[in-house]
Image (spheres, helix red, strand yellow):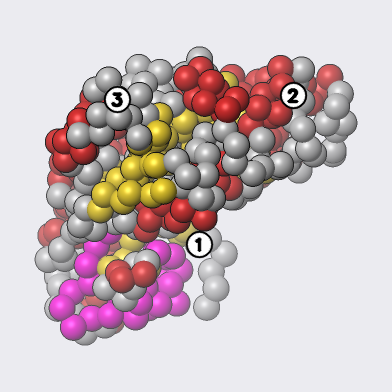
Amino acid sequence: MFLEKQFLQMPGPTPVPPQVLRAMSQPMINHRGPEFKELLEEVTTGVQKIYKTENAVLIFPAAGTGGLEAAVVNFISPGEKVLVASIGVFGNRFAEIASKFGAQVEKMEFEWGTAVDPAQLADRLASDQAGEIKAVIVTHNETSTGVINNLPAIRQAMGNHPALLIVDAVSSLGAVDMRTDEWGLDVVVSGAQKAFMLPPGLAFVSVSPKAWAVAEKCTNCKYYWDLTAAKKYLEKGQTPYTPAISLLTGLRESLKMMQAEGLDQAFIRHARLRDMTRAAMRTLGLRLMAADDIASSSLTSVYAPEGIEANKLRKVVREKYNVILSGGQQKLDNKIFRVGHLGWVQPLDIVATVAAIEMGLLDCGCSIELGSGVRAAQQVLRS
Ligand SMILES: *Cc1c(COP(=O)(O)O)cnc(C)c1O
């Protein structure tokens, strides 16, 4: 049943290219020595280029959620008010972390499948004359629904409000354009296992000068996540604690691949994978969760047809065709499936994925025309 090549079409972890796997199988080096210094400087500069920032970027051994926690404990003090604009599971997670660490969280929720309305955000911030809100927290790409937020519009909606803008860009950075400095993003969190084509285990956090000033006065509890300490070490080419050396050598390789493709080309590729997936699903008569203008380039959320359990379809597609799709999270469980198309994914992976979904739909008793979705995807690819 288990074929050697699995199509891992999930929004993380994503497939890891062989050259990255090879780069990770190197002997250990001294993390306080000159080779490591060179490695850390090279990957930090490389990641800054993807962020389009001059800000410091700290790299930690952690899941992406660790990066979210770092973004809370370094910049938000207990009792401070923060505004979390949430459009799904990951927005809610950020709110929960802030709340656990003592922030007064005000959640502005938008229906799942929609994006943050910048006008509503602008109204709320305009009414905060006293500047009580210390930070605005948003998810760039909401992985639970497949919706991308308009960060420049969100930044603009903040106007002159002094709050920090803190962004979860774990599933967007590298797949879509991110202009940290131009857009005025204070803290941006990302991670290894999505567009960076690495195994899980690295979190990235960029910090603006304005955010460093806040960090100096922040009274929240932290030890491992002390970004000020990490910055001091970075300046001498080290990390405060033992780094994930193998993942960093992998990162050096994946950054080389990203540079060789070119960022703009990568954005075009991801958008095309999105368009292929959406055209195919629509042709098969399936309903998409996100509207065209807010559709994610990283993943597509699709409703299972009426009367068909999404998880049953996923199981058939996995067992018979070796294609791995993600399920819906929380209230979307068994209602949607999510097709990941970020990182090391090429157009024909999507053609194969669509072919498997078509066969899975037939296997589940759904009447669709075999090959119609594949053809729609091919037409997008050739256009
Ligand atoms: C994947 C992801 C994370 C991090 O998830 P971990 O499991 O902690 O690595 C955070 N935010 C978003 C939007 C994500 O897609």
Q: Nearer the viewer, residue 28 or 98?
A: 98
> Which is nearer the N-term, disc 2 or disc 1?
1
Residue 322 vertical placement versus 374 (above, below): below
Task: Please name which of the two marks, 3 or 2, marks the residue nearer to the observer.
Answer: 3
Q: Is residue 132 above or below residue 364?
A: above
Find disc 3 in the rendering and name its residue. Answer: 161
Between 356 and 79, the one lying in front of the other is 79
Question: Residue 287 has which mark?
Answer: none
Q: CA distance from mark 3 to mark 2?
A: 32 Å
- Looking at the image, residue 36 sits to the left or right of residue 13; the answer is right
Mark nearest the camera among 1 and 3 is 3
- Foreground residue among 381 and 104: 104
Report the residue marked by disc 2: 233
Which residue type carries mark 2? Tyr
- Does the CB distance between marks 2 and 1 fall below 8 Å? no
Q: Which residue is mark 1?
A: 6
Question: Distance from label 2 to label 1 (Cα)?
Answer: 40 Å
Magenta span contains residue 34: no
Q: What residue appears at the point 33 percent right and 49 percent down from the top-left corner?
A: 106
Q: Which residues are magenta?
A: 298-326
Given contact means CB atoms under 8 Å apart, are the residues at marks 3 and 2 in contact? no
Residue drawn at (81%, 22%) of the image = 35
Question: Residue 345 location, x and y as percent?
Answer: 42, 46
Above or below, 304 relative to 50:
below
